[in-house]
Image (cartoon, coloured by chain):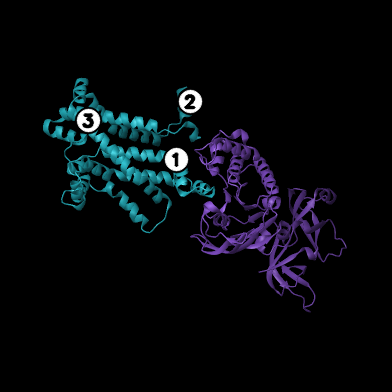
Chain colours: A purple, B cyan
Amino acid sequence: MLSVRDLGKDLRDFTMRGVSFDVEDGDYFVLLGASGVGKSVLLELLAGLIMPDEGRVMWDGQDITYQRIQHRRMGLVYQQQALFPHMTVHQNIAFGLRPGKMQPGALRERVAELAENVNVSDLLHRYPGTLSGGESQRVALARTLATRPRCLLLDEPLSSLDAQSRSELQALLRSLHRKGHTVIHVTHEYKEAMALASRVAIMEHGTVTQVGTPSEVFHNPKSEFVARFVGIRNTFEGRLEASADGNCAWSQFVTEGLVFQVLSEASSGTGFLVFRSEDLMVFRSRVDSSEQNCFPGKVVDMAPARLGAELIIDIGVKVAALVTSESMRRLDVECGSDVWVSLNASAARYIEK
Amino acid sequence: MTQAFIRKVRIEPLYLLFTFFGGLVLLFIIAPLAGMLLQTSFTELTETAIETEVRDSIWLTLWTSMAATLILGVLSVPFAYLLARKSFPFKRLVLALVDIPIVIPHSAAGIAILGIISRDTPLGSAAESMGFHFVGGAAGIMFAMAFVSIPFLINAARDGFAAVPERLEKAAFSLGASPARVFFAVSVPLAWRAIISGFVLMWARGLSEFGAVVVVAYHPIVTPVLIYERFGAFGLPSARPISVVFIGVCLVFFIVIRLLAREPKDAER
């Protein structure tokens, strides 16, 4: 198990502070954050390419914070162009096997086996300059796996690939994970995290702010940043008025003249109301439901989404609602249509500022 | 048809002017060399080429400059790597120091070198006691050649190392390679072209050196000094054939080295 405790590093352009998390053996751990928050620096700290100013990195209880990179067995795979351009694919994969210290036959066999694993057996005599992005990443993975790392550190491995290569490599990463490899994968794409992660850590402002399973993080964002980052489209700044009797969890959130009923035990103050677009219900006329948050509005934009369409509805503020294809047919709406939206109070989440 | 061609080619007047400037510059380089070659007869060339003093001086110039380049090269390439990769206190000062030989007059450089290798200096007297003559010897010539030409190798190799993506070295480290293996298996092969260019530049600069060498060692006589001596004693007709022979020999060597240093085609892809 990898344990990171209060890791900190001062670099010229940014500072990392108090980074702590655990990665269990066999985890697929995705570090999710916007560009420039220090994700790659964190990987280089774990790999041992740079040394931290403070904090500790432990592997199975053993302190490896200042262990030499050659002895760490952390397999780092960069985003792109990290294959040695003057070596063939075979020589690249063999690099970590210390050619010269292995029998040539055994070396060839091992390289062939690794190439087979990542499906690059027919590329062994090619040079990196002639490979596609996806092929290069496969070779880079094979080269790293050759060293039998105890943990794979992947720095945005999918970001420079086309859609086809991306899904192929994603499948390969999933299969590596199934084979028991522990993976730490850095990305700024929420979808990658959803597709691959067994656990997700959110990085912002040089620190890790939330760790959990993808659904925990997605359903319970701890900050407005996380909510926005993980794709929660409806984020509104406003003021929470806590209930007067102090016992009831019902509070009112006021923004742009609209009043939302929310379930929150937070005290009065400013903050954010966040809810997912799939938690918003859309009707052509007012319905008599138990929902307390019912607002009239007008459809101002429509965009196709994975399972239907996303409607942007102006109810005083613009909210995004995800509607299935079937509901779209039933609703028969177009831009300019008058609709009613309703939000279950328990689906809305208040985040204190 | 002509108008269609002109439309197709679209001759931009500004670039036409630049091409004209380029032609003038090329003429400026080629004209003296071509003039020298055309004014020298084949008989003069062959007579000069078989002259013992000329052959000895060309050989001396070639091997001293080559040796100076190789010896200092072994020290300079790792130093260039440090300059390209590492940050350290007073790095800018060190970079400026490396460039000093380029900006000082070469005769002054010769005087400075003489100041540390003449017989009455600790280095000079120690060398003398071991039977090794800096002043008036091949070692002194090499010293002078290396002094004025070393910045060319260091700067070219430094630029070459700086152009190697750092993540390739980091990837090699994370694959368990030692710093020495990263240097020899990744950094040097990828900076190879620039390093060879640096070697060729340093060698070329060394063998053409006159000012510093003539101060340190008039004899044994290197070709640039011999050309000057013949010019002073017998005039242009005597100096010209040696110059042509020397330039010819140098060009052959440069072409051969460039060809040998060419990377295999595959590696460029």
In the displayed structure, does residue B260 sit left or right of residue A220? left
Image quadrant where one finds the N terminus of chain A: bottom right
Image quadrant where one finds the C terminus of chain A: bottom right
* Discs 1 and 3 share one subunit: yes
- Residue type at mark 3: give it: Ser
Circle 2 crowding by C-alpha within 10 Å: few under 14, some 14–19, many from 20: few
- Residue B10, given in percent of the width and then of the height, sits at 45, 31
In the displayed structure, does residue B217 sit left or right of residue A249? left
Say which label, 1 or 3, has the lower sequence index.
1
Asked if B96 appears above or below A139 in the picture, the reply is below
Q: Report the label total.
A: 3
Say which label, 2 or 1, has the lower sequence index.
2
Q: Which residue is mark 2?
A: B4
Q: Nearer the viewer, residue A86 or A291?
A: A86
Instruction: Describe the element under mark 3 as helix, strand or loop.
Output: helix
Q: Which residue is mark 3?
A: B243
Q: Which residue is mark 1?
A: B189
- Residue type at mark 2: give it: Ala
Is residue B224 visible from the viewing direction of this image? yes
Instruction: Describe the element under mark 2 as helix, strand or loop.
Output: helix
User: Residue drawn at (56%, 34%), measured in percent from left and top?
Assistant: A126
User: Residue drawn at (33%, 56%), measured in percent from left and top?
Assistant: B93
Chain name for mark 2: B
In the displayed structure, does residue A314 sit left or right of residue B171? right
